Amino acid sequence: MRIRRREATRSRAGELWADAWRWFLFACGVVFAVYLLLDRGIPNGAVMASVVAALAVGVVLTVAEPLAIVLMATPAVLITERLGLGGVDLTVSDAALAAALGTAVLLGKHDYSAPMKAMLWANLGYQFATLFTVIVNPFPQNTVEWVHAWVLVSGALVAGWVIGRAGHARLAFILILCAATVIAAGTFSTAIVQAVSGEPLAAVYPEWPWPMHKNFAGGMLAFAAFIAYVNPDWARIDTRWTKSAFVVFLVALVLTQSRQAGVGLAIALLVHTLRRGIRNHIALVLVLAVPGAYLVVQSVIEQIESQNRFNSFYQRVDWLREVYALWKHSPVFGHGLRYWYVTPSADFQPPQAEVEVAASTGLVGLAGFVVMWGVMLIVLWRVSPRFGMPAFGLLLSRIVQAQFDLFWVAAQVSVPFFVAGICLGAQAFARERDPDQEIWMPSGRAARSRPARPRADRRARADVGTRRPPAYDRPRRRGGG
């Protein structure tokens, strides 16, 4: 009776908490709507109106599905259009992730698996390492970006986890692929307009449905192409659709001419192929690895030989020299996150991940960054490939992209971790139904992460059919006094 009362009390408390959160979100929506009506100077009022409308719909749907806001925020995580809310430089991706995280924290399940805990602890270690630069360099952008970076990694992991843990991984993947299809359609439409207007063949910067940089569009298309190609069986998405989507995303990626996104995708696919067995996918390796590497190397060689000091190669070399000269003035703790907002002599974001982290957080933060990525990649590599490979491939693709371009960019950081959370949550959901599901890859001492059976029980199972029955079960011998 006591157990039932406790369970009833917990369920009532959960319902009250959900209702309170739902009304809180509704109040936020009303405040935003009033703000839009009163402030006529918002540059992106249409975008804000769409966000508020989506929030209102999500609040209504939470009556039937508590995670409706998280699911509705899933495709919006891929949108980098600015909201223009007062003086806050906030993207739709950041706002969607914040709404998803708030809903996930209050209404989702948080019985994190061992891989998920390891990922969160790794990010916590990096946040602690970067806390020193926040203390040493006190300016507002530094503190705000410290929180922002935490949300982009751990926040995306938690939001993705509750989706997979609730059994909505299939719907989330479909929404992500649909959003990437819209980006691909915008790339094709912009390319067609350029061709019709007689412009020379060049990198496509999609103008529809919102203006995008070619490296952002290429990065999102690369992520979606990898998800479509891997297409895990537990996602239950029709392979005919994913194969067509993979080709569409690949062609759109080529139109953007985002070299770093192409290199990241090629390496992720190569690792995935080698892990599954190169014999079955040798054609893909030859088609992607050889021509892709040749085109990238040839493109870089042409830029070097052109002697154009303003092309992307020489511009990156000059930026790296300037960042190195700046880093030497504060090598241990750096100049602060987003230091280029307050440093006139270096008013640009470094175009390389480790260089940016070193200049921003110093050697202390760089050590935390390297450890974080090393731990996360090792953890996902050890996770059962059915669930770990999609997450591992996206994180590997992202860190490879960041060797040639900006790293701390809203959606390009959050999307891989969001998908990683979905994969780990889906694994926990599958293991809840089948406790024999593998968590870790069978290797060495950590073969499986499952409850260990008592030793006596294991011996009894192993000796079935071979062990002699107990004495009281043996037939008595007759005769012979």
Image (spheres, helix red, strand yellow):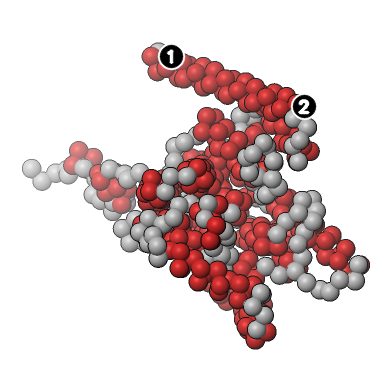
* Number of other residues with Cα within 10 Å of mark 1, as a class: few under 14, some 14 to 19, many 20 or more: few
Kindly identify the residue that appears in the image at 64 percent across and 26 percent down.
Answer: 28
Give the mark count: 2
Q: Nearer the viewer, mark 2 or mark 1?
A: 2
Q: Is residue 22 left or right of residue 479?
A: right
Query: x, y (%) of residue 266?
Result: 61, 70
Is residue 401 in sight in this rendering? no
Kindly identify the residue that appears in the image at 60 percent across and 35 percent down.
Answer: 99
Is residue 474 or residue 3 the one in the foreground? 3
Residue type pointed to by label 1 = Arg
Q: Element at badge 2?
A: helix
Residue 16 occupies which quadrant of the picture? top right
Is residue 465 or residue 102 the one in the foreground? 102
Query: x, y (%) of residue 348?
Result: 57, 60
Kindly identify the residue that appears in the image at 59 percent across and 50 percent down.
Answer: 410
The C terminus - image quarter: top left
Q: Is residue 477 left or right of residue 440?
A: left
Question: Which residue is identified by label 1?
Answer: 5
As drawn, the label of residue 37 is 2
Query: x, y (%) of residue 288?
Result: 65, 75
Q: Can you say whether 72 is above or below 289 in the image? A: above
Q: Spot the residue most to the left.
A: 481
